[in-house]
Image: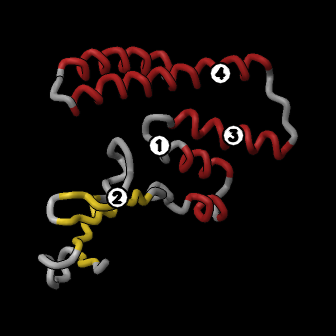
Amino acid sequence: MTETTIGIGGAAESTDMVLNIGPQHPSTHGVLRLRIVLDGERVQHAEPVIGYMHRGAEKLFEARDYRQIIMLANRHDWLSAFSNELGVVMAVERMLGMEVPERAVWTRTLLAELNRVLNHLMFLGSYPLELGGITPVFHAFREREELQAVME
């Protein structure tokens, strides 16, 4: 099988054509690149290429102090900022051998669950947009705003 990549040129009529779809911007619903081999309009092979979310955070963390690491961690995923921050804080506490008060454990659990509900509301609001429905996003965002106020 001979492959021709779109944009380079070649005898596209007699060979399979390779089409790259993506990667999309990291703030879209899912970061994915598809390498598709086409025979005319028929898809012969589709290879998913994942791993585009890596932003080199580990290297950034090496050169910063604890407070700066927390700020970077909560920016990784704009929907789950609290959960990412919580992971870093718990790792540092474990490395230092710290024991947190029971009240902090309960508060963290509550905030993590509220954050999870916020994520679900985002899904329930944005998914119908893919199907042509716009009303659910307004309802979901109204509820999200109320929960965000509770978290603040």
Q: Give the Cα separation between the discs numbered 3 and 4.
A: 13 Å
Dot 3 or dot 4: first in sequence order is 3
Distance, label 3 to label 1, CA atoms, is: 16 Å
Identify the amino acid type marked 2. Ala
Assess whether mark 4 and mark 3 are in contact (beta carbons under 8 angstroms). no
Specify which label sits upstream in the sequence, 4 or 1. Answer: 1
Which numbered disc, 2 or 3, marks the residue closer to the eye?
2
Residue 7 drawn above or below residue 138: below
Residue with the most extreme bottom position: 10
Q: Residues within 10 Å of mark 4 (few under 14, many from 20)?
A: some
Q: Residue at x 61, y 51 (%)?
A: 69
Q: Secondary structure at mark 1?
A: loop
Residue 89 image label? 3
Residue type (three-letter) at the residue carrying disc 3:
Val
Q: Quadrant of residue 48?
A: bottom left
Between marks 3 and 4 in the image, the one whose residue lies nearer the viewer:
4
Of residue 4 and residue 146, the one placed in the foreground of this image is 4
Per the image, label 2 sits on a secondary structure element best described as strand
Is there CB contact under 8 Å for labels 3 and 1? Answer: no
Q: Earlier in the sequence, mark 2 or mark 4?
A: 2
Q: Which mark is in front, 2 or 1?
A: 2
Q: Residue at x 48, y 45 (%)?
A: 75
- How far is the residue under mark 2 from the one under mark 4? 41 Å
Residue receiving disc 1: 77
The answer to whether residue 61 is above or below residue 121 is below
Query: Looking at the image, do the residues carrying marks 2 and 3 touch, with CB atoms under 8 Å apart?
Result: no
Q: Which residue is mark 4?
A: 109
The tag earlier along the polypeptide, 2 or 1, is 2
Which residue is drawn at the image coordinates 58% and 25% (left, top)? 112
Residue type at mark 4: give it.
Thr
Q: How many numbered marks does the figure carry? A: 4
In the figure, is residue 22 to the left or right of 80? left
